Amino acid sequence: MNLLINEPPLQVLPTLATKIGLNNAIVVQQVHYWLRISNNIRDGQAWVYKSIDEWAEQFPFYSKRTVQRIIAELESKEILVVGNFNKLKFDRTKWYRIDYEKLENLCNGALLQNDIIEDDNLSLRNAPNCLNESRQNDVMDNDKMAVSEHDKMAVPITREYTENTTENTTEKKKSRKQVYDESSVHYQLAKSLYEKILVDDPSFKEPNLQTWSDHIRLMMERDGRTAEQIEYLIEWSQNHTFWNSHILSTKKLREKATTLIKQIKAENEKKSAPKKYNNGRTEILPEWFNKRDQPNSQSDEVIDFEAERQKILAKLEG
């Protein structure tokens, strides 16, 4: 039935919208919802983290640029507090929480400049048919933002888009090639490999980092590699005298990952193994062996180390 909402709507109170602007209010309200269910607790606070592309997916009625502008404004107003709790040093994904005290002070004090409502499909809950209206009809006059007695009863303004955008996102991914945000872990790992290659070969042609990022994604999603493992493989291969000239793309890194891991394990085992003679017996070093480079203060006698070694071997074989 066209006149009923069959999806969980994104909601915002008119009172909040008039104080900080509608666009800001919608994003803050959604962040508040995510914080309530977040398991990411740092410094005693709940946090949420997303790349710009992930933010844009959560608000499909906004352009990516609009989302960036809204978040930047909320940061500048200190409504959103920024943190960085990423495990990888090059991961620049931002973590956010709401400064509720700051938000309350802003709402109780001076009004922030209201946003110009420039995005599509804005509606009140009692007018769901506007989903089919054109963009030109979506611009709202400031007088519609006034707080009436009805508004004070906390009737929410609703954008009729589901909070779960899985279906829409899936359709988009099928219809167009995935684009990786520069702050995403996939892009950062791809960029890390490129930068390390440049150390040995400054003239190396700049690759398509979007394509390289996709290979990193496949390593993580299909091959089950973690970001930490991939970071280690990049570091190790580019410091290896053989592999640094053979791992020159993330595609090749993915192809040779298993081989690299086996070689790393073999070399580590070799380093940790005790020294042995050819007969397989563990070498037992005499006490004086570790002192042979020290001056003999008691005697100037020269020790025949080879003769002593042969005596030790004779005892072992006997």
Image (cartoon, grey):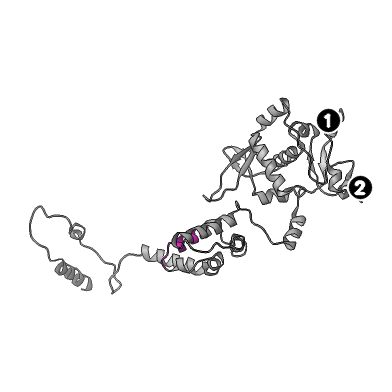
> Could you say where residue 288 lies in the image, as x and y percent from the top left?
18, 59
Up-down relation of residue 309 to residue 119 (above or below): below
Q: Residue 225's quadrant in the figure? A: bottom right
Mark 1 crowd level (few <14, some 14–19, many ≥20, 10 Å Cα) = few
- Residue 230 lies left or right of residue 65; in this view the side is left
In depth, the one of 209 and 13 nearer the eye is: 209
Q: Quadrant of the C terminus?
A: bottom left
Q: What residue span does the magenta drawing correspond to?
A: 232-241
Residue indicated by mark 1: 146
Residue indicated by mark 2: 3
Q: Residue at x 55, y 61 (%)?
A: 206
- Residue 281 lies left or right of residue 40; in this view the side is left
Q: Residue at x 27, y 71 (%)?
A: 277
Q: Residue 22's quadrant in the figure? A: top right
In depth, the one of 201 and 111 nearer the eye is: 201
| Dominant secondary structure (helix, strand or loop) of the stretch shown in magenta | helix
Up-down relation of residue 301 to residue 19 (above or below): below
Q: Residue at x 7, y 57 (%)?
A: 300
Looking at marks 2 and 1 on the same chain, the residue that comes earlier in the sequence is marked by: 2
Dot 1 falls on a residue whose secondary structure is: loop
Q: Nearer the viewer, mark 2 or mark 1?
A: 1
Dot 2 falls on a residue whose secondary structure is: loop
Mark 2 crowd level (few <14, some 14–19, many ≥20, 10 Å Cα) = few
Q: Is residue 216 magenta?
A: no
**What type is the residue that disc 1 sits on?**
Ala
**What type is the residue that disc 2 sits on?**
Leu
In depth, the one of 12 and 297 nearer the eye is: 12
The reply to whether residue 229 is visible in this rendering is: no
